[in-house]
Image: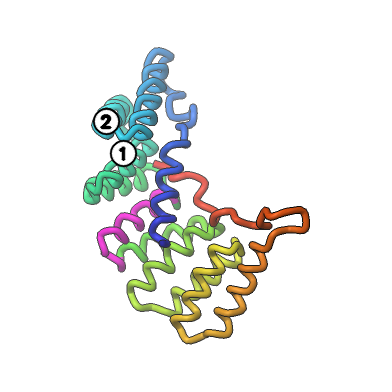
């Protein structure tokens, strides 16, 4: 369930993110226009699951602008969607070396998690949190890794921080499950009651007061 949140974060950003104009600011007008066209092709192709076409567009961008961290990060996401994890990690690491960002590190952590390399996943998430510690989704990702590694205390601490940042029913329920598994039934029950109260229809009708998803990283920078 939690890993689905990670996948959705990647897919949503892949579809909606557009490179900033700064990426092509140093190129002549004709080249910048061509790069914009290639970005449009890459984005459309990824959205339509035309991975080979998207890959060709991104590689062409990198032939023109070999230090474009955004292109490397997008290419990494493309490879990850095809489960070419080794290539994905290489792209994310290049992006991180060119333009350090929490999102690139988070991407690396996701890939290591998917390939069951939990110690490296934990390290990547920790480094991402050092750079950007105000997103609940990052703590949920870190908690999932700690769960796999059998570190119950670190898992709960991370989930408590996620709830502190984004106390919505979904994060409350995840923390409640962790409390249950740790033998803290009373705390779990309290959180479930709180989550249920958030979903009670308001006095005007049947619309729940709160049903939004946990806050995701604003963008996954390549």
- Give the x, y percent position of residue 201: 69, 59
Image coordinates for residue 172, horizontal then vertical, percent: 56, 68
Residue depicted at 42% across the width and 60% down the height? 127
Task: Locate the N terminus and report the quarter of the image it occupies.
Answer: bottom left
Q: Is residue 199 left or right of residue 202?
A: left
Task: Give the number of the disc on residue 125.
Answer: none
Q: Residue at x 37, y 22 (%)?
A: 35
Q: Residue furthest front?
A: 205
Give above or below for 68 relative to 188.
Answer: above
- The residue that disc 2 covers is 59
Kindly tell me whether residue 207 is visible in this rendering. Answer: yes
Q: Looking at the image, do the residues carrying marks 2 and 1 touch, with CB atoms under 8 Å apart? A: yes
> In the image, residue 176 lies at what x, y percent?
52, 75
Q: Residues within 10 Å of mark 2 (few under 14, many from 20)?
A: some
| Nearer to the camera, 198 or 174 | 198
Is 122 situated left or right of 83 in this image?
Answer: right
Is residue 94 at least partly visible in the picture?
no
Q: Is residue 203 left or right of residue 40?
A: right
Q: Give the overall secondary structure of the magenta segment.
A: helix
Say which residue appears at 68% left-offset and 55% top-offset. Answer: 206
What is the span of residues highlighted in magenta in the rendered image?
103-119
In the rendering, at what x and y percent does residue 110 appear?
35, 56
Which of the 4 image quadrants contains residue 190? Answer: bottom right
In the structure shown, which secondary structural element does the residue marked by tag 1 occupy? helix
Query: Which quadrant: the C terminus?
Result: top left
Q: Which residue is mark 1?
A: 75
Sequence-first disc among 2 and 1: 2
Under circle 2, the secondary element is: helix
Query: Is residue 46 shown in magenta?
Result: no
Asked if residue 118 is among those painted magenta in the image, a careful observer would answer yes
Q: Relative to 64, is 103 on the left or the right?
A: right
Depth order, front residue of 21/37:
37
């Amino acid at each position: 369930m939690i890993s689905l949140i990670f996948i959705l974060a990647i897919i949503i950003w892949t579809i909606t993110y557009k490179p900033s104009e700064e990426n092509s600011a140093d190129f002549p007008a004709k080249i910048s226009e061509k790069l914009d066209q290639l970005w449009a092709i890459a984005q459309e192709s990824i959205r339509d699951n035309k991975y080979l076409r998207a890959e060709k567009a991104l590689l062409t961008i990198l032939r023109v602008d070999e230090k474009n961290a955004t292109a490397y990060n997008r290419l990494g996401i493309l490879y990850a969607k095809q489960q070419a994890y080794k290539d994905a990690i290489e792209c994310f690491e290049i992006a991180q070396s060119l333009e350090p960002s929490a999102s690139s590190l988070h991407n690396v952590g996701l890939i290591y998690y998917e390939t069951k390399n939990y110690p490296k996943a934990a390290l990547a998430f920790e480094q991402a949190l050092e750079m950007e510690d105000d997103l609940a989704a990052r703590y949920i990702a870190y908690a999932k890794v700690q769960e796999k590694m059998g570190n119950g205390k670190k898992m709960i601490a991370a989930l408590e921080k996620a709830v502190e940042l984004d106390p919505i029913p979904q994060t409350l329920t995840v923390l409640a499950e962790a409390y249950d598994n740790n033998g803290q039934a009373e705390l779990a029950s309290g959180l479930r009651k709180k989550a249920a109260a958030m979903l009670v229809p308001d006095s005007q009708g049947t619309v729940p007061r709160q049903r939004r998803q946990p806050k995701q990283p604003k963008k996954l920078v390549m």
